[in-house]
Amino acid sequence: MGRIMKPAIVKIVAGLAERQIKSSFVMQSAMKTAIKKVEVSCNNCGSNASTLVTEGVEHEYKNTTSDTFRVVKCKDCGLVYLNPRPDISELPTIYPSDYYAYHLSEKAQENTDSLLYKARRHVYLSRLEKALSMCGRKESLKVLDIGCADGRALNWYKQVRSFKVETFGVDFDEKAVELAREAGHTVYSGRFEEAQIPEQYFDLVVATHVVEHVADPKAFAKKAFEVLKPGGIFLIETPNIEAADARLFRNRHWGGYHFPRHWIFYSPTTLKKLIEGCGFAVEKTQFHPAPAFWNWTMHSLVGSVDRTNDGAFSRLSDRLFPPTEFQKNSLRNLIFVSAFTFLDIVLKAITGSTSNMALTARKPPQS
């Protein structure tokens, strides 16, 4: 019996190994090289004069591109941006179908009783209620979430008890749009700058970590100005390039780079210049913990230790700091999110800021 089984087992193992090799080859071959890129000037001031900050590569997904990307700083106004950056036609390349934001509810494996879920929900609702309170007391408030993905945040917006909220969203990923619509939200399909959205219609426009992804932030902010009612509120969150961890890991590894999907990196000064230049009055700038950035930073840092081709540290970084699974309501994520959040609280107390910058602006009532 043993003599019969042994060759069979060897054959099975060999077959599995062959499939694994083929699978690995397919995964590696899925990484595109020399994707289409465009040279760009500074979006804030139009200057073409810049200095190199760092270079970096994709490390979160294995089915996008293996190209190296340059981060530069404008010599005239200090804006930091990717140059050259991927062309708009490459969006399907750099945002794969398994991109984490497209399936947040699914990836989180929603357990509404988990501590992590309750904490995230509390944070979102607290920030939203504060923004809604600035819109004034009305029978109903219309909220537009730019880059709404699968509608997870919109689901939470509907749970605000202090206000009656009508939820709207916009996203260019068709699958995400479908999921958000199935959840009961009105969702516009396409890039926000090009989508057919009524003007002077919304009380609150929310852009949570979106502006750094767009090709023309000026056009983006101007569109937000147009769709807001006079006196409406624009809430925008984006990475802070001047945060302590951004400075410490500036040479490639800072999670806020999110290569190659983040195209512009703002400081409080350059973000304020953008928003005020589009007609808004900036009311306040705040800083919140950014555990996701710390997760990506550590994933890049640990993975870069590899000095051979065996990929041991890359696999270790995938296990310790999974770049696409940090949204799950798991014990591991609860521990790491808590640790990274505490670290940011300490850094904020010492330096006054974090990597997550939230600016609140108002459209003038007479607009």
Image (cartoon, rainbow, N blue to C red):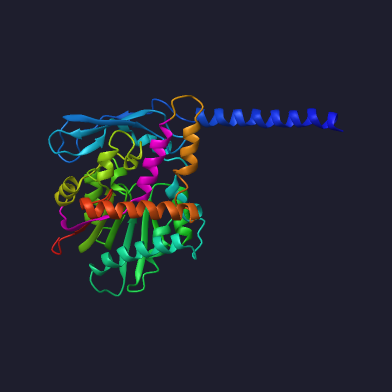
The residue lying at 51 percent from left, 61 percent from top is 111
- 211 to 74, vertically: above or below: below
Q: Quadrant of residue 55?
A: top left
- 245 to 22, vertically: above or below: below
- 74 to 323, vertically: above or below: above
Q: Is residue 337 visible?
A: yes
Q: Residue furthest right?
A: 1
User: Taking 109 as reference, is 350 left or right?
Assistant: left
User: Taking 99 as reference, is 130 left or right?
Assistant: left
In front of the other: 326 or 187: 326
In front of the other: 37 or 109: 109
**Is residue 54 one of those drawn in magenta?**
no
Q: Quadrant of residue 1?
A: top right
User: Taking 87 as reference, is 280 left or right?
Assistant: left
Q: Position of residue 129 (x, y in %)?
A: 30, 67
Q: Position of residue 84 (x, y in %)?
A: 28, 30
Q: Quadrant of residue 358?
A: bottom left
The residue lying at 42 percent from left, 63 percent from top is 155
- 38 to 206, vertically: above or below: above
Q: Position of residue 142 (x, y in %)?
A: 31, 65
**Is residue 288 one of those drawn in magenta?**
yes
Instruction: Give the residues drawn in magenta, as a range.
Output: 279-305
Q: Is residue 149 visible?
A: no
Quadrant in which the C terminus is drawn: bottom left
In front of the other: 320 or 105: 320
Give the number of callouts.
0
Q: Position of residue 163 (x, y in %)?
A: 32, 72
